[in-house]
Image: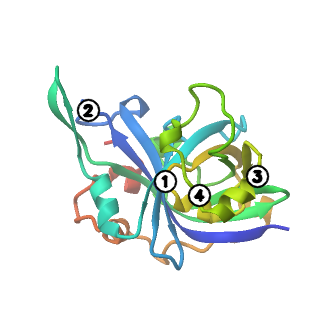
Amino acid sequence: MARIRETGDLSFWYQPRVTVDRVRGPDDVARFYLLLEPAGRAIFRRVIVGRKRLPDVGAHERTWGFVDLVACRPEAVADELAPETDETRTRGVRVAPRARPAGEAGYAIVEHAGHTHLVYVLELPEAPGPVQHELGIHRAMSMIVAVRNPEGAAPPATGLPPGRRAHYPEQLQRALGTRRFAPLDSPKFLDHPGTELVLIAASGDPLRELGIDIPKCRETPEPTDLLSRLGAEPGAHPLGPLLEGRWE
C-alpha cells in the first residue's frame, strides 16, 4: 500500500547560459532545477538536476541532484531566479539571463514497496511542447528518490565536496545509519542544503501504478500565480516555455 508523506506544488525551471540571448534548445541551458513548495509549510526547496533534464522513463535512467537552496521567504527565491552576474579576468562582467519556468505540477512524496517516490502530475503547460519533451518533463511521472549519506564513503570526484554536503540533525543522520544511500523516508531531508539525491525514473503512469491521487496546484492554474507566490514581478520571467512549451 502506498503512503503519502507530503504533497505540494512543483515547478520546473531552466537557467540559460551566460552567452545566450535566446534559448533554442537544451544545449543553451546552464542549469535545470525543481522548486518544491510543500503544502501547509512556508518553505521553498530548490533541487538542481545534474543532467539538466529528468531521467528517461523508458530506460529507467538515473541521475544525480542536490538541494542547493532552502528559503522561508519568497523574496529569497525571487532573488535566486533573477539574472546572475559572472565576472572573469578575461571576459569581464557577464550577466546570465533570468530563469524560465518550464512547467508547474502537483506533487507527492510517496512510500511504496520499500522505496520512496517523487510523483508529479503536470498542470502547465496544458499541451507539453519541445521544452518539456527535451527536458524529460512528462504529463505525469514517478521517480524513486534515495538520499546519499553525507558521512558515508564515496568514490573520488563524485557528488558534492565534503564542505558542501548537508549537516543533518542527529535524528535524521541516525536514520541513515551506515548506509551509503537510503530511501527518502522523511521529506525533512529536503529541508537541508547540500542534501544529495539519486533520482531513478520509475513510471509514466504513477497514479494507476501507486493507486493514489495528487491534489492540484490550483483549481485554475495561472502562470501569474506562480510568479506572485515567488515574489517575482509580473513580466520578470519569459512565460513561453510555461504556457506554450516553446524555447525562449
Mark 3 belongs to which amino acid? Gly
Q: Position of residue 192 (x, y in %)?
A: 52, 58
Q: Is residue 99 left or right of residue 235?
A: right
For marks 3 and 1, give the one nearer the viewer: 3
Q: Is residue 219 above or below residue 54?
A: below
Q: Which residue is mark 4?
A: 168
| Residue under numbered circle 3 | 177
User: Dot 2 corresponds to which residue?
Assistant: 20
Quadrant in the picture for residue 174: bottom right
- Could you tell me which residue is drawn at 44 percent across and 71 percent down? 221
Q: Which mark is residue 193?
A: 1
* Distance from Cα at disc 3 to Cα at disc 1: 20 Å
Q: Are marks 3 and 4 in contact (CB under 8 Å)?
A: no
Of callouts 2 and 4, the N-terminal one: 2
Query: CB of mark 1 within 8 Å of CB of mark 4?
Result: no
Residue 14's place in the image compared with 86, above or below, is below
Is 98 placed left or right of 220 in the picture? left
Residue 152, percent across and down?
Answer: 69, 41
Q: How much space separates mark 3 and mark 4, taking CA atoms?
A: 12 Å
Residue 21 relative to residue 77: left or right: left
